[in-house]
Amino acid sequence: MHNLEPAAILDGLRTRWLGQRIVYHETVNSTNSVAKTLAEQAGTEGTLVIAEEQTAGRGRLGRMWLAPRGTSLLFSLLFRPDLSASRTPALNMICGLGIRQAIRELLNLPAQLKWPNDITVRGRKLGGILTEMSTTGKRVDYVIIGIGLNVNLTPAMLPREFNATSISQELGRKASRLLLLQAVLWHIEQRYTALCHGKWPAQEWASALETLGRCVSLRTSQGTWRGVATGIDDEGALMVRLNGGQSRRVLVGDIMPADEPTGEGPAAGPHIAG
Ligand code: BT5
């Protein structure tokens, strides 16, 4: 299989600017941390930070990201979007959509997205996106998008409760991390350019979310509820109709499919609220 050194990545990379500057480490604490430091030191938009192994890979809300060395794609992208802080969820959306499209087109796997930041195949987690940003007032200084994708690993290498899968597990053979990375970067660049030209991704993102229209169990810092995920709003917040009847708008949280019927009849299809 190909290695992920900069010369290999650049050879065949079709993007104009995304990933054209590369910081490569064999081992690093977290590619997001390296990218943050770079961003603070006036690093260029589009810089790719990539590693074979992370010693302190991060998920959201203080959680960890685990990936056996050399098996995965672990990278971060530095963006300096001309967006107000409340509009930055669009970057999570375009990256999720770009990853999904790359996996579908290159590998013919039925990749889906799960609110707010998971990439899934057949209901199992294949990857995740971690967005971190710095703002001054309402202005965005930079956004770091960290992406972890399980490529050539068996789920048994990870704790069972992760409910993880990988590209090789789904395909029944190993896949080229390099080709997948190049395709992901290409699709993200295309979508970022469209975003800069005013194409808002929320509608397409909503239709790529596996969980809309379904009964879910919703976990937030304020508690756990059950209800139907009815849609998302323009900022990527999830709209949930709770079993009690009220609606709730959730910006930060996790959802799990909940199989029990809510007794409220079939849910409406995916839509954008507000
Ligand atoms: C995420 O967080 O899914 C975002 C993960 C982002 C990782 C990338 S790797 C490159 C960059 N540098 C970093 O330090 N991070 C980014 P969250 O939704 O909070 O999910 C975290 C949860 O996913 C954990 O608590 C585990 O349950 C599960 N998990 C951890 N590693 C996993 C893996 N390899 N595959 C599937 N699930 C995993």
Image (spheres, rainbow, N blue to C red):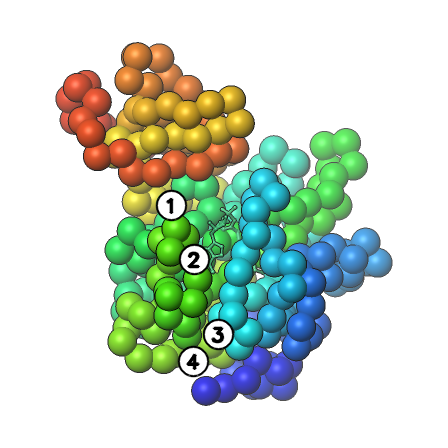
Q: Mark 3 points at which residue?
A: 71
Camera-near label (1 vs 2) is 2
Q: Which residue does the numbered mark 2 point to in the structure image?
A: 159
Mark nearer the viewer, 2 or 3: 2
Foreground pick, 23 / 242? 242
| Among numbered discs 4 and 2, the one appearing first in the sequence | 2
User: In the picture shown, does residue 81 fall above or below 48?
Assistant: above
Q: Is residue 33 left or right of residue 103?
A: right
SS at mark 3 in the image: loop
Label 4 SS: loop
User: Of residues 3 and 220, which is closer to you in this image?
Assistant: 220
Up-down relation of residue 114 to residue 25 (above or below): above
Please report the residue visible at 26 percent of the width from the left and 55 percent of the height from the top.
122
Q: Name the residue under label 1.
A: 114
Q: Is residue 232 above or below residue 55?
A: above
Mark found first going from the N terminus, 2 or 3: 3
The reply to whether dot 1 and dot 4 touch (C-beta < 8 Å) is: no
The 10 Å Cα crowd at callout 1, few under 14, some 14 to 19, many 20 or more, is many
